[in-house]
Image (tube, rainbow, N blue to C red):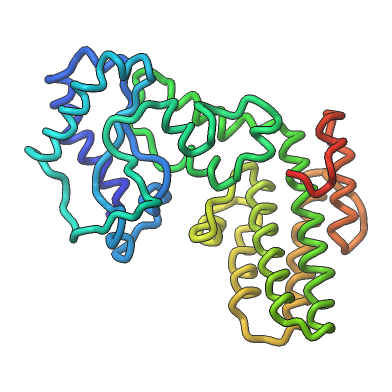
């Protein structure tokens, strides 16, 4: 059983009945769940995950206003709960300075500020364009077990569903140019210049841009590198590219064969761009399709940005 499922069972079977009995006044304004960083929130945890920043628990989410009224009592409740009714135990786990707890009483605005840099869903074109996609993915992963106030769930839905289409198109165009420049052009040029290290850097850039491209084609956000390829396997559109990207990075065949795989990947991307009616060009080079994507952007402000911006 994954940690997230274990935590959810612990909340409903152990925590919730006691919370309702001990602090009934907090129930209308509370949410509970587990989201943010960590393999547990992605559902990818395993035995290796237990060695750092690992513990079964959950977050009790309150708005800043509700926390001022209920936070102290709720914090004492959570501490007492873990002491008197400890959840499933695992071997001792080290704490990393970059980890940070996603458990206990958490102010909703602080949660999003910590992950996104602002206290809720993006409110401007700039926030949508320049907030890292892995941060947006972190903000909506995991699970909300209970949300009586419907505050954190509403924000999560806005992040997951309300990215402006013009922003998505701008990002797709930027990824298409990046993939063309790094994989279709510079990779083999560096090989011919006898610069294999530079060639591998470009191949890595191609894969990173390609991962983002596939998630954007699925209208969602790519996680950080550790889980990006694994998460891609569950997508509806082009999940098979997860294995092809991984093979580009780990395969031992000569560069010429990798260049062929790059072209095959680009052909699949172009095929999906045509399915989504974002390009109708008969051109093998992704850069040409980037400019076709730009033609679909309605906002003059966004369409005037540099092709690689976003």
- The reply, left or right, for residue 160 in relation to residue 254 is left
**Residue found farthest to the front:** 97
Front position in the image: 275 or 24: 24
**Residue found farthest to the left:** 84
Q: Residue at 56% x, 35% y: name it.
A: 160
Above or below: residue 63 compared with residue 195 = above
Residue 117 rendering spot, x and y as whole percentages: 53, 34
Q: Quadrant of the C terminus?
A: top right
Residue 66 rendering spot, x and y as whole percentages: 33, 16
Q: Residue at 81% x, 34% y: name it.
A: 302
**Residue found farthest to the right:** 282
Q: Quadrant of the N terminus?
A: bottom left
Front position in the image: 144 or 302: 302
Total tally of numbered discs in the picture: 0
Q: Residue at 37% x, 50% y: name it.
A: 99
The quadrant in which residue 149 appears is top left
Above or below: residue 33 compared with residue 206 = above
Above or below: residue 79 compared with residue 185 = above
Front position in the image: 289 or 309: 309
Q: Residue at 37% x, 33% y: name it.
A: 144
- The reply, left or right, for residue 247 in relation to residue 263 is left
Residue 168 rendering spot, x and y as whole percentages: 72, 40
The quadrant in which residue 167 appears is top right
Residue 82 rendering spot, x and y as whole percentages: 14, 39
The quadrant in which residue 263 appears is bottom right
Front position in the image: 172 or 309: 309
């Amino acid at each position: 059983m994954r940690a997230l499922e274990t935590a959810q069972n612990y909340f409903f079977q152990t925590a919730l009945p006691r919370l309702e009995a001990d602090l009934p006044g907090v129930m209308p304004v509370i949410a509970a769940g587990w989201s943010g960083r960590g393999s547990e929130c992605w559902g990818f945890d395993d035995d290796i995950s237990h060695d750092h920043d690992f513990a079964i628990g959950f977050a009790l989410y309150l708005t800043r206003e509700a926390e001022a009224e209920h936070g102290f009592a709720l914090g004492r409740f959570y501490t007492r709960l873990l002491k008197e009714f400890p959840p499933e135990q695992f071997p001792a786990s080290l704490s990393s300075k970059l980890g940070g707890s996603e458990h206990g009483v958490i102010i909703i605005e602080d949660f999003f500020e910590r992950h996104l840099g602002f206290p809720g869903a993006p409110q401007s074109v700039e926030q949508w364009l320049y907030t890292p996609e892995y941060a947006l993915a972190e903000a909506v992963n995991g699970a909300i077990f209970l949300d009586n106030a419907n505050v954190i769930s509403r924000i999560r839905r806005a992040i997951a569903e309300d990215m402006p289409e013009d922003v998505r198109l701008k990002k797709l165009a930027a990824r298409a140019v990046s993939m063309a420049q790094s994989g279709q052009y510079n990779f083999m040029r560096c090989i011919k210049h006898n610069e294999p290290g530079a060639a591998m850097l470009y191949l890595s850039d191609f894969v990173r841009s390609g991962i983002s491209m596939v998630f954007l084609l699925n209208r969602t956000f790519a996680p950080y590198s550790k889980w990006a390829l694994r998460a891609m396997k569950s997508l509806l559109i082009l999940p098979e590219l997860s294995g092809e990207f991984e093979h580009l990075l780990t395969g031992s065949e000569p560069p010429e064969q990798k260049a062929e795989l790059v072209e095959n990947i680009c052909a699949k991307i172009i095929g999906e761009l045509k399915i989504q009616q974002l390009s109708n060009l008969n051109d093998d080079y992704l850069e040409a399709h980037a400019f076709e994507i730009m033609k679909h952007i309605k906002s003059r402000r966004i369409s005037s940005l540099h092709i690689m911006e976003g």
